[in-house]
């Protein structure tokens, strides 16, 4: 029996009897997508190398290496946090690599190339505003968030099938922001190093403030762009994407301006500013992400339940695939037979299937998503057969 589709939703495919559907994406389409992805990663990688060489020449080998090692610590903190957000439906590694390369290389290059020009224009437009305020509170947020945001916007178009909603947008934007912060931290740490004439309290103080107290600052700013784009892509239409990008960019710039200029509100007391304003904002962001994760889990359960009604899953499988406890149980069961890898594949395919069905419900790219739905169902059928075969062999 096939469940009744919602308004605008394509009917669910019937469970085939006695065979596995053999469907494939045209090789030319796969080839074009793969070539574009490789070219984008290669181009962003080249830019990052050029930025690295520029910093190496400007800072010297010792400062570059020391500050680079120190910058890895807040980067690691950010990536662990983003990994936690991304656990339910992990994004493709290639897309995440590109996001990091864009943040650490391309967005920094754009900032270095355009920052001075934009600053001169702002000085002419705002002659009564102090130069340091223009540079720190206005120019830096505008240029940096626009540069980072362009990378997230590019991912919307080149990795559309994996850009499903707000959580995906937050993850991609967060990785871009973490990459930018990594390179920027090298610059800040080296400035402290040179100003003090060597390793000392000043470098330690800057490291604690930027690397330990506020490693997520750039991640949070740019996440506003990813969140807005993630909401926008739920429905079809390029206009929605452009509007979402504009709204997210405005929020990111406002947050960055507030961060850079907010200490004036509390008489330049960083710690008072941090604990009264930044800690609550960070807690609010964590709470929002937690809520979004729960929403995505509920959506997975709902959509897989529809496939269960059509005969593709059993109710027990839906519970195993759509709850954290069920997934742990499934992996524990598969581990007894040495089948954790195919079980992870089964979970990943099922989650992607649920989100693909949601795109169909929303009327987004119906032809492409219907084909993707059939491919995922075929893959799930094969993965289930492989799992059951391994389990049967393990019981002998």
Image (cartoon, rainbow, N blue to C red):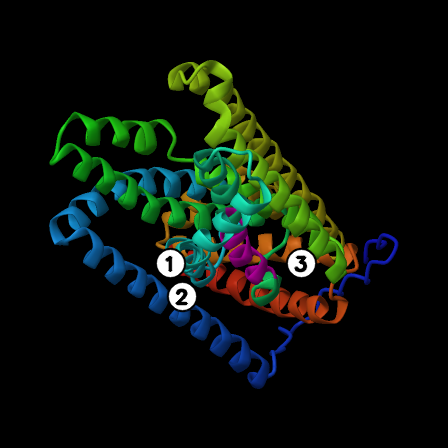
In this view, the residue in front, 95 or 22, is 95
In this view, the residue in front, 15 or 149, is 149
Badge 2 or badge 1: first in the primary sequence? 2
Q: Magenta part of the protein: which range?
A: 145-156
Crowd tier of the residue under label 3, counting other residues whose Cα lies within 10 Å: few below 14, some 14–19, many 20 or above: many
Q: Residue at x 21, y 55 (%)?
A: 58
How far apart are labels 3 and 2 at the CA level? 29 Å
Pair 3/2: label in front: 2
Q: Residue at x 74, y 51 (%)?
A: 306
Asked whether 40 falls inside the magenta stretch, the response is no
How far apart are labels 2 and 1 at the CA level? 7 Å
Q: Which residue is mark 3?
A: 356
Residue 248 percent across, percent down from the top left: 63, 44
Residue 105 image label: 1
Residue 44 image label: 2
Residue 240 percent across, percent down from the top left: 74, 54
Q: Residue at x 24, y 62 (%)?
A: 53
SS at mark 2 in the image = helix
């Amino acid at each position: 029996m096939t469940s009744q589709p919602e308004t605008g939703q394509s009917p669910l495919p019937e469970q085939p009897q006695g065979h596995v559907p053999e469907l494939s994406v045209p090789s030319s389409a796969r080839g074009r997508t793969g070539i574009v992805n490789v070219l984008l990663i290669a181009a962003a990688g080249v830019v990052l190398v050029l930025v690295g060489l520029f910093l190496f020449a400007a800072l010297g080998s010792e400062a570059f290496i020391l500050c680079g090692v120190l910058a890895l610590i807040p980067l690691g903190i950010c990536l662990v946090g983003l990994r936690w957000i991304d656990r339910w439906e992990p994004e493709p590694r290639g897309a995440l690599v590109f996001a990091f390369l864009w943040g650490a290389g391309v967005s920094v290059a754009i900032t270095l190339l355009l920052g001075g020009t934009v600053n001169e224009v702002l000085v002419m437009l705002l002659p009564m505003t102090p130069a340091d305020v223009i540079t720190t509170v206005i120019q830096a947020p505008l240029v940096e968030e626009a540069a980072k945001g362009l990378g997230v916007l590019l991912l919307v178009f080149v990795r559309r099938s994996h850009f499903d909603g707000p959580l995906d947008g937050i993850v991609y934007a967060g990785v871009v922001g973490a990459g930018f912060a990594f390179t920027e931290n090298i610059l800040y740490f080296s400035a402290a190093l040179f100003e003090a004439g060597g390793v000392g309290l000043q470098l330690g103080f800057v490291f604690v403030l930027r690397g330990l107290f506020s490693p997520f600052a750039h991640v949070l700013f740019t996440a506003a762009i990813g969140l807005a784009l993630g909401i926008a892509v739920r429905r079809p239409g390029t206009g929605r994407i452009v509007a979402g990008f504009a709204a997210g960019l405005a929020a990111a710039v406002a947050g960055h301006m507030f961060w850079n200029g907010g200490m004036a509100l509390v008489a330049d007391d960083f710690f008072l500013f941090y604990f009264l304003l930044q800690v609550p904002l960070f807690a609010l962001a964590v709470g929002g992400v937690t809520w979004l994760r729960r929403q995505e889990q509920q959506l997975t359960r709902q959509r897989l339940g529809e496939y269960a009604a059509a005969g593709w899953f059993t109710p027990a499988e839906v519970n195993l695939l759509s709850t954290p406890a069920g997934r742990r149980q499934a992996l524990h069961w598969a581990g007894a037979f040495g089948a954790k890898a195919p079980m992870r594949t089964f979970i990943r395919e099922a989650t992607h299937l649920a989100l693909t069905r949601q795109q169909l419900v929303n009327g987004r790219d119906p032809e492409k998503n219907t084909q993707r739905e059939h491919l995922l169902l075929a893959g799930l059928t094969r993965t289930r057969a492989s799992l059951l075969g391994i389990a049967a062999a393990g019981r002998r």
